[in-house]
Structure formats: C-alpha cells, structure tokens
Image (cartoon, grey):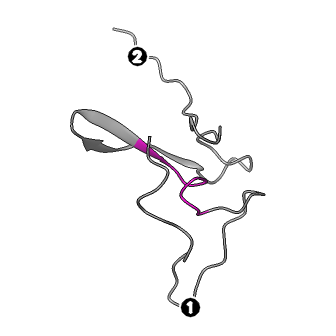
Amino acid sequence: MRVTVSTVQCPKCGAEEMHPDGEKLLIRGFKVHDAGHWWSQCLVCAGYYNADLTVKPIGKDGLNPDYDHEKGWF
C-alpha cells in the first residue's frame, strides 16, 4: 500500500497549509469528519489573519473577535 499526502490549499484564497514562517498553520487540514467527508478550515478565510498573514489583534477576553468558526470550511 502506498499513501501519498499532498499539501492542502484553500480553493477560495489559495492559502497553503503552513504559514510562510514555517511555524503556524493557515489551514487546519482534515480536522472535522462530517457526512462522510473530512473538512479543512482556512484560517485566512475565517478571519483569523490579516491580509499580510499576521494574527489579528486579540480582544480583552483573549479571543480574536474577527475569527468566525463558521467560515473557511472546504
């Protein structure tokens, strides 16, 4: 048996799985299994990052107010 894993790329914005710094993720690859399909979430499309791929400011509650858990799924 041969298993080949290719990189994950967002079909909407083109972001790749790893951040260019090599330490953070831009896509949570294959994290949720629902209805017979493994789903990935693009954190760029979900609003976690700014256009320059820096994390958006965290609010007083310790959360990123622009990050929408419902967006970025593919």
Q: Residue at left 64%, top 42%?
A: 13
Q: Is residue 41 magenta?
A: yes
Image position of 66 (left or right of 53):
left
Q: Position of residue 8 (x, y in %)?
A: 54, 33
Q: Position of residue 53 (x, y in %)?
A: 72, 57
Q: Position of residue 62 (x, y in %)?
A: 52, 84
Image position of 52 (left or right of 55):
right
Q: Is residue 14 magenta?
A: no
Q: Residue at left 60%, top 50%?
A: 26
Location of residue 41 with respect to 48 vertically, above or below: above
Q: Quadrant of residue 58?
A: bottom right
The disc labelled 2 sits on which kind of residue? Answer: Val
Task: Tell me the number on the disc at residue 3.
Answer: 2
Location of residue 66 with respect to 73 vertically, above or below: below
| Front in this rendered view, residue 53 or 4 | 53
Say whether marks 2 and 1 touch (CB < 8 Å): no
Q: Position of residue 1 (x, y in %)?
A: 33, 8
**Magenta stretch prevailing secondary structure:** loop
Task: Find the magenta span and give its range.
Answer: 40-48
| Front in this rendered view, residue 7 or 50 | 50
Task: Tell me the number on the disc at residue 72.
Answer: none
The disc labelled 1 sits on which kind of residue? Answer: Lys
Q: Residue at left 44%, top 47%?
A: 73
Location of residue 53 with respect to 37 vertically, above or below: below
Name the secondary structure under disc 2: loop
Q: Residue at left 58%, top 51%?
A: 25
Name the secondary structure under disc 1: loop
Image position of 71 (left or right of 55):
left
Tally of numbered tags: 2
Crowding at dot 2, Cα within 10 Å, few <14 / some 14-19 / many 20+, comes out as few
Task: Tell me the number on the disc at residue 60.
Answer: 1
